[in-house]
Image (cartoon, rainbow, N blue to C red):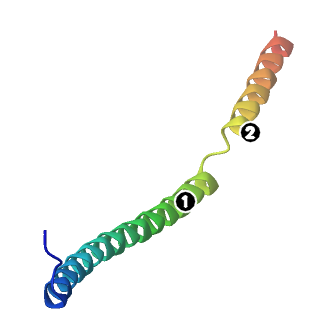
Amino acid sequence: MTDPSPSDVALELERLRSTVEAGFARIDGSLALLVQRGDQVDRQLADHEQRLDALEKNRWPLPSIVALVAVIGLAITLWQAAAR
């Protein structure tokens, strides 16, 4: 087996360098896409939080309405019982 010449070593190192650069470029593109998707998810989550807060503020006060109907029903029952 013969020792490789310096020009052969330099050529192989250049090929290796170009392969590594291409791999890093591909990984960098993938990471940029993941960051973009993460930002989109963050915006959607913030939008959903705002919409949920708006729905919670505007919901009917159902327990208060139930209590009011119960008091009115009791008042009508007492009124009818007093009228007899």
Is the residue marked by circle 1 packed among few (<14), some (14-19), or many (20+) residues within 10 Å?
few
Q: Picture coordinates of residue 48 (x, y %)? A: 48, 59
Q: What's under tag 1, amino acid-wise?
A: Glu
Q: What's under tag 2, amino acid-wise?
A: Ser
Q: Picture coordinates of residue 32 (x, y %)? A: 35, 75
Residue 53 located left or right of residue 77: left
Tags 2 and 1 in contact by the CB under 8 Å rule? Answer: no
Q: Report the front residue among 67 and 20.
A: 20
Q: Picture coordinates of residue 11 (x, y %)? A: 15, 86
Q: Residue at x 57, y 60 (%)?
A: 54
Name above or below for residue 67 compared with residue 23.
Answer: above
Viewport quadrant of the N terminus: bottom left
Q: Secondary structure at mark 1?
A: helix
Distance from label 2 to label 1 (Cα)?
A: 26 Å
| Extreme-front residue of the structure | 1
Mark 2 and mark 1 lie on one chain; the one further toward the N terminus is 1
For mark 1, what is the residue?
A: 49
Q: Quadrant of residue 74?
A: top right
Residue 19 located left or right of residue 70: left
Q: Secondary structure at mark 2?
A: helix
Viewport quadrant of the C terminus: top right
Q: Residue at x 76, y 32 (%)?
A: 67
Q: Picture coordinates of residue 70 (x, y %)? A: 75, 26
Q: Residue at x 13, y 84 (%)?
A: 8
Q: Report the front residue among 53 and 21.
A: 21
Q: Report the front residue among 33 and 22.
A: 22
| Extreme-top residue of the structure | 84
For mark 2, what is the residue?
A: 64
Name above or below for residue 70 compared with residue 15.
Answer: above
